[in-house]
Amino acid sequence: MDDHQNKDNMREVAEDKLIDGAFKHLIDTYMASRHRKKIDIITKAFNFARQAHKGVRRLSGEPYIMHPIAVAQIACEEMGLGSTSIVSALLHDVVEDTDYTVEDIENIFGSKVAQIVDGLTKISGGIFGEQASAQAENFKKLLLTMSDDIRVILIKICDRLHNMRTLASQPANKQYKIAGETLYIYAPLANRLGLNKIKTELEDLSFRYEHPEEYASIENKLAMTQSKRDMLFDDFTKPIRAALDKMGIKYELKARVKSPYSIWNKMQNKHVSFEEIYDILAVRIIFQPKERDEEINECFNIYVAISKIYKSHPDRLRDWVNHPKANGYQALHVTLMSKQGQWIEVQIRSDRMDEIAEQGFAAHWKYKEGGDTVDDDSELNNWLSTIKEILDDPQPDAMDFLDTIKLNLFASEIFVFTPKGEIKTMPTGCTALDFAFQIHTFLGSHCIGAKVNHKLVPLSHKLQSGDQVEILTSKSQHVQPAWINFATTAKAKGKIQAILRRDSRETQKKGEAAVRDWMQQNELQMTTANLDKLCDFHNVQKHEQLFFAVGEKSIALSDKDLDVLREKKKEGTSSWLKRIPFFGHDKKDDKKEFFVVGSDFNKKKPIIISEDNIETFIFPNCCHVIPGDDVLGYIDNKKRIEIHKRDCPVANRLKASFGNRILDAKWNMHKRMFFDATVEIHGIDRKGMLLDVSKVITDQFDINIHKVTISSDHGIFDGTIELRVHDRDEVKVIVESLRKVEDLKEVQRIL
């Protein structure tokens, strides 16, 4: 017994030492910062939180208090925040996890800290609940609290970053949920707040847990090509150093290497291999301006000097110095041709601009510790007022609401001029209609066209940076349903949908009355089951959509509808049966039922997909899974399991909205079944090309070519080859071998 007690005591002493060490490190970091020193309140918050979380452990086994200390450390060291934020970070889980209330926090630490902790408590447990509607509500709360005090969101990002850094202790299904949520919300949010370093780390950590093999492969390739990059950097910067020394500038040259996630993203979007990505290396020139108010001119002086050494790319000069991004980012980007024949991007920025680029808003809007208010800044206020506009009229559908928010907050910017020459910042890809709604709802809803650079254009015309736009209106014009297809900003989409919803409510009511009358005439009850059958028959998702369609007369109820309602469902025919993209199963097993998740189902254990059970899962068309793909399971509304690729766009939305329904899935296949896979090829047309391609596939791999489509245009050809394969590895080997065929320039698996 004593021995047992001794062990417990020793463990307690060791843990106390660990906690004290972590807190001392936090205080040392804070003391070294430029903030006014308020150690007493930080120590008070630490002791309070330590006591409140006493005896509680994280999944990793360490004392729970280590988490709030780590979050406070990130807030202090990596975001440069002051004492109010550090105190709030230390206390951020107290209200949610212990018996203390927000009132207790207010009495001990004051109203400001209480407000921030309350904001953090409202959005705790991830943004998302079990239901999508709850998740949208939570997201609205998050944004509302954020528009009161931006520190809520900054500390939430610190919290998420620490959770991502310690994600290894979570089960795989939780890892996918948290990583998916991070990519969907937190990384773009960090980007919009200008927290570049944190955004990159969040993306990389998400990528590492969702696609461990691909992550390891890119890390490995980066390590193998490191010495080559170092040589290129040294050779390229040597004459630049000489020129800057001659100008008497104090500077630092840094090599910026593209992150694994960015590389992978580019490989996916541009369909290129790692070796074909030319911009893995960029060069950063960070200088100390001789005069602070001359730093913009000095950026251009450096640009002029280095473009005398290397040829610059005419279309790739990005002036974020005179026109900072909405997240405060300032730099001059120029792309130069190196002596090795490679384009290299050079980013020129002052030390101040560099701090803003790395730390974002925290460096930009320093808090007045006395009054605890954010320094007023138009960009920050613009951003927060955009959020408030979206919240004034949120979408009824949670996913729409989320996408609308993402659409607006996380887009890149262009600069557009009004007829009077005022500059407006708009998201890339926006249209003349978006611009009209940006200025005024009345202008948008009565807009008939626009003049862009004095030329008449339709509402759907996409705007470019530097365009001057005049909106043309007519009192007789009304919002059209088709407008939603070419509105891209949250404000325009939100306003159009609100006006259309108002109009459609009347139509819907008319339709509902018509359906009720029709049911009564045919001696049927207007039950949920009957309405579901009609929705299935007419291929609409919701009862409201059915009513609307009947109201606007695009659906007419007839005898066929009566047959649907009166017939008993035939066994084995089900409207939701989804295409299963594989062959080679036993015909007598065709009537296998889908697996249904029961109450005793363990979500933490991976589901194993094998030849014996593959037909009991649903394989939707969105991502065309084959064995070997990184996959996950999703429990649908009818408790069946869908299988998706982990990077499938639909899966990304599911991870962010229904995280608790995500399962880990693993393959246990034995090359007995065949699956559809499509490979896309592009190259230079020549005699015998098709023969060489088919030879590689059939001779080397004995694989069945299902269909080949080739089209040639002016000596360039495009084609797709549909194959029957056992798994992803076979496709990989085929793609690698096809890349070796002469004059074949691009090969990749699609779908």
Image (cartoon, helix red, strand yellow):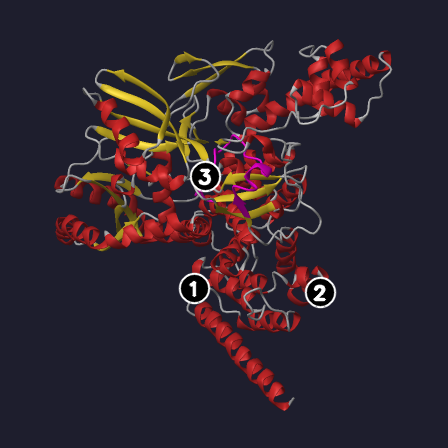
Q: Looking at numbered disc 3 in the image, what kind of residue is underneath it? A: Arg
Q: In the picture provided, is 285 more to the left or to the right than 369?
A: left
Local packing at callout 3 (Cα closer than 10 Å; few below 14, some 14-19, many 20+) is few
Quadrant in which residue 422 is drawn: top left
Name the secondary structure under disc 3: loop
Q: Quadrant of the C terminus?
A: top left
Residue 611 lies within the magenta run: yes
The percent coordinates of residue 529 (x first, y second) are 78, 27
Tell me, for residue 672, which label it has, or none.
Answer: 3
Q: In the picture provided, is 331 more to the left or to the right than 472?
A: left
Q: Which residue is mark 2?
A: 100
The percent coordinates of residue 203 (x first, y second) are 43, 48
**Nearest the eye: 201 or 304:** 201
- The CA span between labels 1 and 3 is 66 Å
Q: Looking at numbered disc 1 in the image, what kind of residue is underneath it? A: Arg
Mark before the other along the chain sequence, 1 or 2: 1
Q: Residue at x 43, y 54 (%)?
A: 363
Q: Which residue is mark 1?
A: 34
The span picked out in magenta is 608-630
- Give the answer, above or below, for where 165 lies relative to 293: below
- Give the answer, above or below, for where 517 lies relative to 571: above
